[in-house]
Image: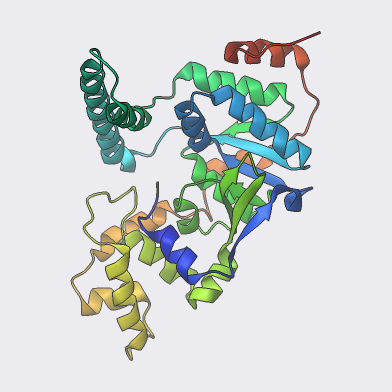
Amino acid sequence: MGIKYLNRFLQENCKESIRKVNLYELSGKKVVIDTSIYMYRYLGEEALLENIYLMINILRLNNIIPLFVFDGKPPKEKEDLLRERKQNKKKAEEKYNELKNQLIDGQNAKIEEQMNQLKKEFIRLHHTDIKDVKLLIQSLGASYIEAPGEADKLCAKLVNKNLVYACLSEDMDMFVYGCKRVLRYLSLLNKTAIMYEMKDILIELDMNFNDFKNICIISGTDYNIHNNNDLTNTLKYFKKYRKSKEKKNNFLSWLEENTDYINGLEVREISKLFNIDDVPEFKNCLKTKILNGPINISNLKTILEKADFIFVN
């Protein structure tokens, strides 16, 4: 889910580039949504269909046109990460069941709290969940598309091609892709989100995008999970680079020449995975019509009945 501590670093150093927005400020805009993040969140709250329904209606009420993007096949480069996540889910579920057995003889608030946390760690999206959400989106007259790979990469491309205004996502990888505008911390209750402006972030950091991207990759992404570097140390090296007389080279080249902190070849290979400029697989996706059509009441009732909605004639 992105680079550890990057969000804290941006919030501390880019206060002018990050601001709370009321959703009505985005009236008339198209927003692409990194769907799986919110599906996992709402499934963990045991309100998947209810909250997707609420999200779409709040966006429509604020005249925002959404495009939901679903994940396609994950890249082979993330096999290690996916394997690790699967193992962690299994461990969390085993621990949950152990605690559940301890509760048989009575109530224990502390154990119940642990169980609630563990339950969130082994949430699994099933094919039927995805199918239901897609039907709900269609029933409400909105649009969705399945990415050829991971959704976040296509989301960033859609924003940077000006086909949509911003991306709604909690994934910090959006910044490594160079996504122009990212909306985070969506509040359905307050109808607000936090807007990150990539161009302004780079200005505040006095940094070009290439160096920013390399700093993120060097500090550890989902593609190099066994990397021992971190953002704090990488930024220390970046400060040394700025003070050096060798700024004619970029930061990555300077690190290679003056330290043993990185594997330059690995960083360059990972950097290619975050490239969104020339991706042939996106060609058809970029032609997607983003609809704001009528609601299909019949289909909507069918899908919402699964969430125990009650309809009164």
Residue at the far left in the pictured view: 260
Residue 157 vertical placement versus 253 (above, below) = above
Residue 188 vertical placement versus 299 (above, below) = below
**Residue 83 falls left or right of residue 301:** left
| Residue 162 in view (yes/no) | no
Residue at the far bottom in the pictured view: 245
| Residue 165 in view (yes/no) | yes
**Residue 61 falls left or right of residue 108:** right
The residue that appears at 48% across and 34% down in the rendered structure is 41
Residue 23 vertical placement versus 38 (above, below) = below
**Residue 92 falls left or right of residue 295:** left
Residue at the far top in the pictured view: 313
The residue that appears at 59% across and 12% down in the rendered structure is 306
The residue that appears at 44% across and 24% down in the rendered structure is 125
Specify the quadrant that holds the C terminus.
top right
> Where is residue 213 drawn, in percent x and y?
42, 64
The residue that appears at 34% across and 48% down in the rendered structure is 222
